[in-house]
Image (tube, grey):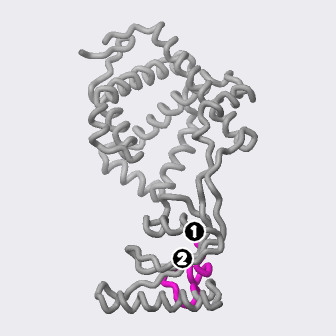
Amino acid sequence: MAIKINGFEITDQMIDYEVERATNFYLMQGIPQAEIDKDKAAIREAAIEHCIATRLMLEEAEKQGIKASDEHIKDQLEKIAKSNGGMEEFEKRVKASGASLEMVKAQIDFNFKLMTVEKNAVEKVPEATEEDARKYYEAHKNQFCEEEQVNALHILITPKSKSDEDKAAALEEIKAIRQRIVDGAEFIKEAELHSACPSGKQNGGSLGWFGRGMMVKEFEDAAFSMKPGDLSDVIETQFGYHIISVNDREDARQLEFEEVKAEAVNAATSIAKEMERSRFIEELKSKATIER
């Protein structure tokens, strides 16, 4: 069934475009295609609602006489062109896609109208109070946590090939380095002289602070099992053989409200603005003739 907003038809192509855009967004967030497919109906319904809201806001912009100035369009066009190799190159790309600069300008005007209508709709929403921010903090404490972190150095010895002989030689080398450190040699100096990792020559083997999920599993498991001052045994990963020295570590902890007050205020304010935007859209719907 066709969807019409005050006589304007929202085509299947418009809806399909929004469905594709949403699908690509979810894929970029790491959501598997199979999971997305399960929610196809919901995604399509959300796309329809988006198309309806967009059309209503565009009509509202026309009523308010909102339009991008020639200067604004020129400025935005130049910015887009600059990020695409310059105006000449950008114009070639636009033509190759079957579009034109006039179409790009129309899109800039379109975006300006929507953004301005949305901005006007929520501009009177005040900044969240400390009480509102604290309520948000209490309801979303899991968003305000500091993850467990380790500050460590490492030395990497990479076998020259995958042969057993080269792997054995690399293992013997890393064992010898570890023994020298145990006997009093400086870890940093050994890293500078022998490590195959760029961090060796550049930073004396320092990896700085890192959290879980940033290193390969074997390396991570070892590093997070150590205490400051510990020297690891030899660890084998896909990159070769490592030894790790832990400088410091910080346990995971719940951040206190005062530490994240500004962030909580921003989050609570954003929610209030989104609620006002939704109320505004519903008000536009109530005044429109929508055929579904």
Quarter of the image that includes the C terminus: top left
Residue 228 location, x and y as percent?
Answer: 65, 70
Q: Is residue 285 left or right of residue 98?
A: right
The picture quadrant where one finds residue 140 is top right
Mark 1 is surrounded, within 10 Å at the Cα level, by few (under 14), some (14 to 19) or many (20 or more) other residues, namely some
Residue ID at (62%, 78%):
203
State if disc 1 and disc 2 touch (CB < 8 Å): yes
The kind of residue tagged 2 is Ser
The picture quadrant where one finds residue 66 is top right
Compare residues 46 and 10 and report the one nearer the observer: 46
Residue ID at (47%, 80%):
234
Residue 102 location, x and y as percent?
Answer: 42, 39
Residue holding disc 2: 232
Residue ID at (67%, 22%):
125
Q: Tell me the SS state at disc 1.
A: loop
Which mark sits nearer the N-terminus, 2 or 1? 1
Residue holding disc 1: 226
Q: Does the magenta stretch include residue 204?
A: yes
Compare residues 90 and 256 and report the one nearer the observer: 256
In whole angstroms, how far apart are the C-alphas of marks 2 and 1?
Answer: 8 Å
Q: Tell me the SS state at disc 2.
A: loop
Residue ID at (57%, 21%):
275
Residue 182 location, x and y as percent?
Answer: 60, 87
Q: Does the magenta stretch include residue 85?
A: no
Quarter of the image that includes the N terminus: top left
Q: In this view, does 197 lie above or below 18?
A: below
The kind of residue tagged 1 is Met
Q: What stretch is highlighted in magenta?
A: 191-207
Mark 2 is surrounded, within 10 Å at the Cα level, by few (under 14), some (14 to 19) or many (20 or more) other residues, namely some
Residue 241 location, x and y as percent?
Answer: 44, 80
